[in-house]
Image (cartoon, coloured by chain):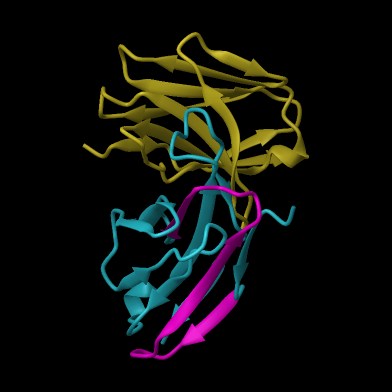
Amino acid sequence: RKEVEQDPGPFNVPEGATVAFNCTYSNSASQSFFWYRQDCRKEPKLLMSVYSSGNEDGRFTAQLNRASQYISLLIRDSKLSDSATYLCVPLRDDKIIFGKGTRLHILP
Amino acid sequence: NAGVTQTPKFQVLKTGQSMTLQCAQDMNHEYMSWYRQDPGMGLRLIHYSVGAGITDQGEVPNGYNVSRSTTEDFPLRLLSAAPSQTSVYFCASSYSRDLILDTQYFGPGTRLTVL
């Protein structure tokens, strides 16, 4: 089983809609988790950290389910500028593992 | 602050040629790393450094060398380029290796093609 698995998409979502995608991880020792955003032909940028209690940053909500070993990202009221690839990133023993990413296209 | 800078942005090499990808940061970050990103793949760690004079191998180190003579610079050397090294290379830095506390910042990338 791969250490990090994400649905590659693409998710084609109309502007204003809510979209959610999950990421599963195989190593239960993973200590922390992050969502990164990567625009086409650009570098990855940290979107948000994922805390055990879940966290929210504006239109973005991240959740962690340790029992089922997945994290999720919810985007509400999606904007055209949200179109990007979203990378799931577990951290274990100072080792950061990048998922292959989920592509999101917001349609006007 | 310029952040993390990488040069060149694009490079084409012939098999067997050597070159150095440059990476510099002006944020006084101790931790620096090199990743490669291939189509349909996640970023994979090549080498990293936790401070000047200290380097270590990541997940895919073969074919690459690094050095860290200063805090600011972390060049990546390809000694004899191979087509399998065609990729996009990202340099990243953070204040410390503790990525729970410290955000990792990425450079804009170098797109390398080896013919």
Where B96 falls versus A22 (above or below)? below
Vertical comparison of B31 with A26: above or below:
below
Please give the range of residues in magenta. B10-36
Indicate yes or no whether the magenta region holds residue A91. Answer: no
Q: Which residue is drawn at 34% across and 36% down?
A: A4
Q: Residue B108: give x, y in percent of width and height.
A: 62, 60
- In the image, A101 versus A91, the foreground residue is A91
The question of residue B23 being in magenta is answered with: yes
Chain drawn yellow in the picture: A
- The residue shown at (51%, 59%) is B90
> Going 60% across and 76% down the picture, which residue do you hit?
B8
| Residue nearest the observer in this picture, A56 or A91 | A91
Q: Main secondary structure of the magenta part?
A: strand
Question: Horizontal and vertical percent for residue A108?
Answer: 78, 40
The residue drawn where x is 41% and y is 25% is: A32
User: Does the rendering let one see residue B41?
Assistant: no
Q: Which chain is cyan?
A: B
Look at the image and tell me whether residue B29 can be seen.
yes
